[in-house]
Amino acid sequence: MIKEVLLKDAIGQAAHIKNDSITAKELVECSIEAIEKLNPSLNAVINPLYNRARKRLGELDQNAPFYGVPILLKDGIACVNGETFSNGSNLLKSYVAEYDSELVKRLEKAGFIILGKTNMPEFGLLPTTEPQAFGPTKNPWDLSKTPGGSSGGSAAAVAARLVALAHGNDGGGSIRIPSSCCGLFGLKPTRGRIPLAPLSSLIGGLVEEHVLTRSVRDSAAVLDILAVDDPYSFYKAPSFIGSYLDRIDDKTDSLRIGYSLTSPFGNRIAPECQDAVMQTVEMCKSLGHRVEQKDLYIPFTGKDLGELFNVLWSVGATTALAMFENKTGQMPTLQMVEPLSLALYKEAKKVTGPQYEFTLQKMHRVARAIQEFCGQFDLWINASLAQAPIDLGRMKQDVDQPMKPFKLASEFAPMTALFNVSGQPAASVPVYWNDDGLPIGVQIAARSGDELSILQLSRQLEKLVNWEKRLPSLLDY
C-alpha cells in the first residue's frame, strides 16, 4: 500500500496523509527506502538530507497543504542553510550555504519535506548530467541514456518515482530538456514569476525556478505556492489573479495554436520528434482547437543567438571561478573545474563592460522579435528537443576541444533557449514514446504571463495520453 503511494502525484500523496491512509513519517521513510534502493543505479541524489528531513517533520505545520510530501532540491541556485551547495563542481564541493533561499522557505511552509540534493552538470552548462565531481546520472527509461540537464538528477528521481516532484531551474532549457528525456511535465514560468530571493537576477534574466512533475496539477499547485510577488525582484511577471490549480480544468474556448516541425536555425529535427509534434497537433484538433503550421521567424541567425548566449553564459555561469580567483589570487585549474567551465571563464575575462551591455540590449531585441511572432497565437508548439535522449558520454569533455560540448548541445536542444531569451512561459509535455520506449516531449509556449493557457492545454493532453501510467522498466513494482 505504501509503495503504491509513491506512484501517486504530490496532490495524491498529500490526500493519503490527510485521510490517514498513511502517516507523513511512513511516506518519508518509504521515499528514503526507494532512494536507497534505486539511487545506486541512477546516481540522481548526491547529498541525502535524511536526518534533517526527519527533524523537519516535527517542526513544520501539519495543517499545511503538502505536509509530509517528500521533495528533492537541485544542487544549484536554491540553498539550504547549513548544507553543502556544489553547483555540480569540485570547486564548490565543500561550500556550506549560509541562508535558506526564498524558494526553500516557501516549499517548507507548504509542508514539503526536502530529502536531499540532486545531481547536475557543472554550473548547469550542459543539457546532460555528467559532472566530473559526482559522475553521471542515468535515465530510468534506459540506463545508457542521458536524463538531460541541467536538472537531470531531479528528472531521473521523479521519473523513477523516488519522489512525486523535484525542484529545478531553467536558463536555457534546464527544466524542459530533462522533462522531455524522462517523460515528465516541466514548466518554465514567465521571467520574474518566481522570485530568486535573496538573489535578484541570474545570467541577464535567463534563469527561472520551478519544479519537474509527473502531473500537470502538481505543477500548477506548486506555481501557486512559489509565484508570490517579491517586492525586491529585479524582474516582474505580469500579475495573475487567482489559483492556477483551481483553473486548470476550466472549459476553454477554441485556441489558436501555431506549430512548427523545424528549428528556426536550420538544425535537423529527428523524424520521431516531428512525429511527437504531429501527434500533439492531431490531439489539439480533436479537442476543438484551431491549428496552423507556421515556422518561427526572427530576424537573427543561429550564430547571432549563439554569440549572445556565449557572452551571457560565460560571464553569468562562471562567477564562482571569478570569486575564487579574487579571493586566492590564483587562476582555477583543470583539477578544480571542467575544461568547458575553464574555457568559458577565460572567454568571460575578455568581455568588456560595453560588450556585455550591448549583448543585453541585443537579447531584448531578440526577445521582442520572438514575442511579436508568438503574439499571433494563443499557444505555439514545437519539439522540445531535436533528438531522442542521447547516449551518456556523447558530450564528454575534451581538454583539446573544450567548447565542443556546446556545439553538440545546440544540435541536441536548439529550441528551448529561445524562450529564456524572450522570457515567455514554456513547458515540455510528455505526449510521445518512440519505438525504443524512450520519452519525447513537445514544447508548448505562450505569451508572457500566460502560464494558465499552457497548463490548461497540457491538462487536456494529459487526459488523452494518461502518461502517468507509463513506468520505466527500472521499477519492479
Image (cartoon, rainbow, N blue to C red):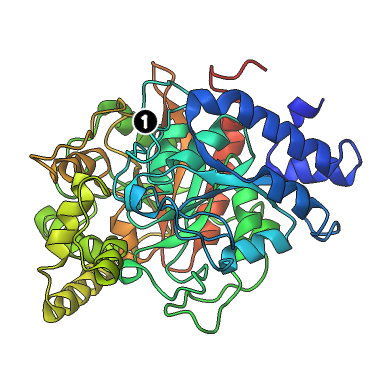
Question: Alpha-carbon neighbours of circle 1 within 10 Å: few (<14), some, or many (≥20)?
Answer: many
Q: Which residue is mark 1?
A: 146
**Residue at the (32%, 65%) spot, across then down:** 422
**Camera-nearest residue between 199 and 273:** 199
Question: Residue 93 placed where, x, y %?
Answer: 42, 50
Image quarter of residue 327: bottom left
**Camera-nearest residue between 353 and 378:** 353
**Residue at the (23%, 29%) spot, across then down:** 394
Question: Residue 32 placed where, x, y %?
Answer: 68, 34
- Judge whether residue 161 can be spotted in this image: yes
147 in relation to 449, above or below: above
- Judge whether residue 6 can be spotted in this image: no
Question: Residue 112 placed where, x, y %?
Answer: 70, 53
Type of amino acid at the residue the image marks with label 1: Thr
**Which secondary structure, mark 1?**
loop
Quick check: 204 left or right of 186?
left
**Residue at the (49%, 69%) spot, across then down:** 196
Question: Residue 259 placed where, x, y %?
Answer: 33, 46
**Residue at the (25%, 30%) spot, across then down:** 270
